[in-house]
Amino acid sequence: MSTLSDLAQTQGLLTEHEVEWLHRLAGDGQLLADLASADIVVWIQTEDGSFIAVAHARPSGAATLFYRDIVGERVRPQWRTQVQGAFDSAEIVDSSSPDWFEETPTRVRAVPIVIERRGADPASSVIGVVTRHTNLGEARTPSRQQITFDECANDIFRMIADGSFPDPAAPTSPRRGAPRASDGLIRIDVDGITTFASPNALSAFNRMGFDDELEGESLAEVTTRLVPPSRQVDESLPVVVTGRAPWRTDIEARGVTVSLRAIPLKDHGTRIGAILLCRDVSELRHQEQELITKDATIREIHHRVKNNLQTVASLLRIQARRTHSDEARDALTQAMRRVDSIAVVHDTLAQGLTQKVDFDEVFHRVLKLVAEVASAPNTRARTQSTGRFGVLPSEYATPLALALTEVVTNAVEHGLAGQEGIVTIDAARTEENLRVTVRDTGHGLPEGRIGQGLGTQIIRTLIQGELSGSIEWRGSEGEGTEVVIDIPLRWLTK
């Protein structure tokens, strides 16, 4: 759909509302292609008066005429007069004789795309043209289903030409799992009586317990008999099965779930019936429920891990307060801080459904853990961060959070020990690399030497071993220290 928006906004003279109208229409391009057994192309007029294709749908049950994508191409000379005529007159224009396309006989219909503007002249409301390209080379005696599908397509084309399709009242819903014409189609008249039901549609209702013919039956009464009285149903179900609104709903009976989509049919504003597309989505709904259960389980696991880590941190804090050895107290305090930084990541993961985290939020909370160290006697340190880390996979958020905790803590404890200063953390992210620079205004590295303590070993292990990155310490005594961490994003996003 991004191609449609880009072309419509850069090549056409359309408003945002008109582009949205085209989006809705293009979203039903596959439905039109399947009903008409033809290629469907959406054209808009450019600034120079020509036409450019912004959407294309191929039929599922028939041979396509266009084996290569024509989106972005200008209208071909043999269609130009017909497309221009539909655009200027706001009326459907059919080809007077077969049109030959790459040695294949075709029939072309040009339909003006009229946007709903009450009180406006129809010609002034045309924002584009839909063309239907039917392959006549595969013509054969049509079945009753093909005849009905073709009639439904013609009804929708007439609605496109009078501005009543797509219906602006139709809610936008995910395309995943949406019923298609080939999944099952039911046509009802203005009274809700079924006049046609495709074999797939009838099979879907048979699986729910209906063992008769749908044709001649009131679809509303059929669904009422199918749904158990004890089961709560969507309040939109009666409106959908009578074809009065362009909505979607589900029917569930005997462990089978059927998704229904209603498309009201109108003739110059007067309702003449409806098309109902139906699809057995039992397996899809089961998979969705399993995913919901899985997500809930994963979130619960992260929540419990966070609680357990916080319990461990609390035990370390109690032990640190009771020890009489300064060295032991420092070691326990550092261990507590490391456990807390890991708990922050799990707490963030427990709040969402994705296994990726907004690391800027995580690091903001990690900095708060350093505040306790920064408030040590004779040390007044302020931290400030710039740039953005962005979203990172959970398996990399934990080692990075722990490594940055060590780096910032070292800057406060050793770089600014006994004085006032600033620790700045800058994150710079590109498509290929994440660079984090930590600077302090403290003592600097004595003789440029890097510490060999446990903290430094942890940092190297996390950055180089787990993140496949690099780390470099820079600075000299009296001029502060700069730590530069480079992490390749190909490892973060694999």
Image (cartoon, grey):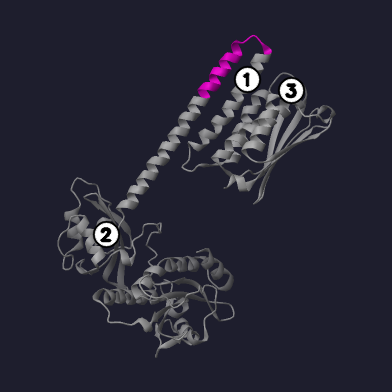
Query: Could you tell me which residue is drawn at 52 percent across and 33 percent down?
Result: 346
Q: Amino acid at mark 3?
A: Thr
Q: Is residue 286 above or below residue 152?
A: above
Tag 2, which secondary structure?
A: helix
- The answer to which quarter of the image holds residue 47 is bottom right
Q: Is residue 60 above or below residue 438?
A: below
Queried whether the magenta region covers residue 321, the answer comes back as yes
Residue 232: numbered disc:
none
Query: Could you tell me which residue is drawn at 42 percent across and 75 percent down?
Result: 64
**Which callout, 3 or 2, points at the residue further toward the start of the chain?**
2
Q: Tag 3: Cα neighbours inside 10 Å, few (<14), some, or many (≥20)?
A: some
Q: Amino acid at mark 1?
A: Thr
Tag 3, which secondary structure?
A: loop
Instruction: Report if residue 121 is visible in the image.
Output: no
User: Disc 3 vs disc 2: which is toward the camera?
Assistant: 3
User: Disc 1 vs disc 3: which is toward the camera?
Assistant: 1
User: Disc 2 vs disc 1: which is toward the camera?
Assistant: 1
**Which callout, 1 or 3, points at the residue further toward the start of the chain?**
1
State the separation of the CA atoms marked 2 and 1: 64 Å
| Magenta segment | 310-326
Q: Which residue is mark 3?
A: 379
**Which callout, 2 or 1, points at the residue further toward the start of the chain?**
2
Query: Could you tell me which residue is drawn at 61 percent across and 45 percent down?
Result: 491
| Residue 230: image location, x then y, percent | 19, 45
| Residue 12: image location, x then y, percent | 55, 73
Q: Nearer the viewer, residue 468 or 212?
A: 468
Q: Which residue is mark 2?
A: 239
Q: Amino acid at mark 2?
A: Val
Q: Residue furthest left?
A: 212
Q: Are marks 1 and 3 in contact (CB under 8 Å)?
A: no
Q: Which residue is mark 1?
A: 333
Q: Tag 1: Cα neighbours inside 10 Å, few (<14), some, or many (≥20)?
A: many
